[in-house]
Image (cartoon, coloured by chain):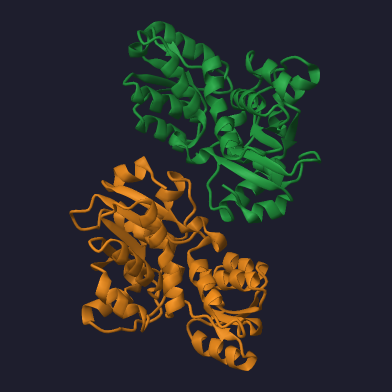
Chain colours: A green, B orange
Amino acid sequence: MTSRLFDAAAGLQCFFKCENLQRGGAFKIRGAANFLASMDPADVPRGVVAFSSGNHAQAVAIAAAHFRTRATIVMPHDAPASKVEATKAYGADIVRYDRLSEDREAIGRRIAQETRATLVPPFDHEWIIAGQGTVALELLEEVPDLDAIAVCIGGGGLLAGCATAAKAMKPQIRVFGIEPAAANDTFLSLQEGKRVEIPPPDTIADGLRATTPGALTFPILQQHIERVLLVSEEEIRAAMQFIQTRLKLVVEPSGAVPAATVLHRKLPPGIRRVGIVLSGGNI
Amino acid sequence: MTSRLFDAAAGLQCFFKCENLQRGGAFKIRGAANFLASMDPADVPRGVVAFSSGNHAQAVAIAAAHFRTRATIVMPHDAPASKVEATKAYGADIVRYDRLSEDREAIGRRIAQETRATLVPPFDHEWIIAGQGTVALELLEEVPDLDAIAVCIGGGGLLAGCATAAKAMKPQIRVFGIEPAAANDTFLSLQEGKRVEIPPPDTIADGLRATTPGALTFPILQQHIERVLLVSEEEIRAAMQFIQTRLKLVVEPSGAVPAATVLHRKLPPGIRRVGIVLSGGNI
């Protein structure tokens, strides 16, 4: 999608990849579907388990239903009610936990062991990364002459996949990762040259609250991305409002983070045409 | 656009024509652009005048700017602030009036006479009707095998144009006009067989507050539409919310009126595939 009004405000030509219009309301279905499609068919009937603040959960639930198997989803108590309801509606079983005191990964692994189901990690897996990378694949197929792409970073699965796909298709493309300033684990990690862990961040962008980049995603980001740019909570809100009132699209806070960077003219000079991933719309 | 979730709720296959994503945020640019393109070129430099609760105003402002001439817009004092601001931003001069006590048509005509500008009527003109009809033209070009289309009725320009185009392309298509129950002037007029005038209606659908069908639009509606269906204010709100939370699209109340009818299963039996016009997104 394009918008004259957004372009005028940003001073650039912008091309939006609207993953808010994707099934499940976010890009996550790409990785989840690729994961289930790549599993040993003998393992599929025993079901899958996922831990997620929301969009990955819905995606695994949809993918599991498509492959006619069972999904158990470990979700934090403070996950948005709309995401919990939507995940249930797709037929998944929900297990709640306390985001600040409990370890969702440990809970997910325990359930997987007890039920012999397969854990579908939210980002740190080759199949997930490859699936998410189809976002950039499709964007560049449709708009080949982009100077840059801007992608948000939670655990880094979307950006690692997009960077891999984009650089393979167009080696000179500039790839930017965007984080909320309050959730700058990848920014700090790239600065230090190793994975840094931050405390659970308090940001409106609930999909980007990962506390450290993935073991698999981080080296990919180190190799391919030019820089991580940071946006404030106010800039995220302003971008959401602009997209809602002028582009008539609902994007969730996490989904508006790369658009916020571009709207507030934080990209470095030399870029005229930029691809912006609107990663989700589940407010 | 399509939505599995909407289809499941409505029990039909629905195809949305997203005029909320149109320039100016509504279908109105179609009629306004066709009007200015059809004018005697000698008249264009003297400018145009329009009276409108909002979307027609923005459309005339955009079309006038495109044809490098001046637009004067007569808008009610209670027009949504977003629409007034947007119209100003497109370069138009604004004249305000009181919707309940003053006659916007008289004000518009006076300004047109004084400045020798051309009045661009909001709906009751062949060029406007023909322009709005391209909504159905495009929808049926893309989705030819529709059983029915559902279109909102303000003054009837959009529906008259869409009905004319749809019936010409596909004589057996069923055409439904939809009004808020609180603004049922066309419903009553069709019942009585002549144009009925109602008091200024109080409905959240601010684009559908016309008090009587147009002299030109009404006979076209009499000829082509199967029935007018009515929706409540609650049904309009519920449809807006569904479209916003599940389809991730912002639609204004008027724009959600046909979707409200389909979502609440008010279409008669025998329809499996329906085209629904989301006429605007300027909340």
Report the number of discs.
0
* Residue shown at the point (51%, 40%) measured from the top left: A20
With respect to residue A139, does B223 lie above or below?
below
Is B7 in front, or is B39?
B39
- In the rendered structure, the answer to whether residue A83 lies left or right of residue B148 reads right
The answer to whether residue B180 is visible is: no
Residue closer to the observer: A11 or A55 = A11
User: Along the line of sight, which residue is nearer the eye, A169 or A195?
Assistant: A169
Q: In the rendering, at what x and y percent does residue A274 appear? A: 68, 41
Q: What percent of the width, then of the height, locates residue A212? A: 66, 19
Residue B133, position as x, y percentages in the image: 40, 67
Residue B21, image x, y percentages: 51, 55
- Residue A274 vs B53, above or below: the answer is above
Whether A33 is drawn above or below B216: the answer is above
Q: Residue at x 66, y 82 (%)?
A: B45
| Side of A244 relative to B165 (left or right) | right
B175 displayed left or right of B133? left
Residue most extreme to the left? B269
Residue A226 occupies quadrant = top right
The reply to whether residue B31 is visible in this rendering is: yes
Identify which residue is drawn at 35% across, 25% down. Answer: A66
Residue A203 sits in quarter? top right
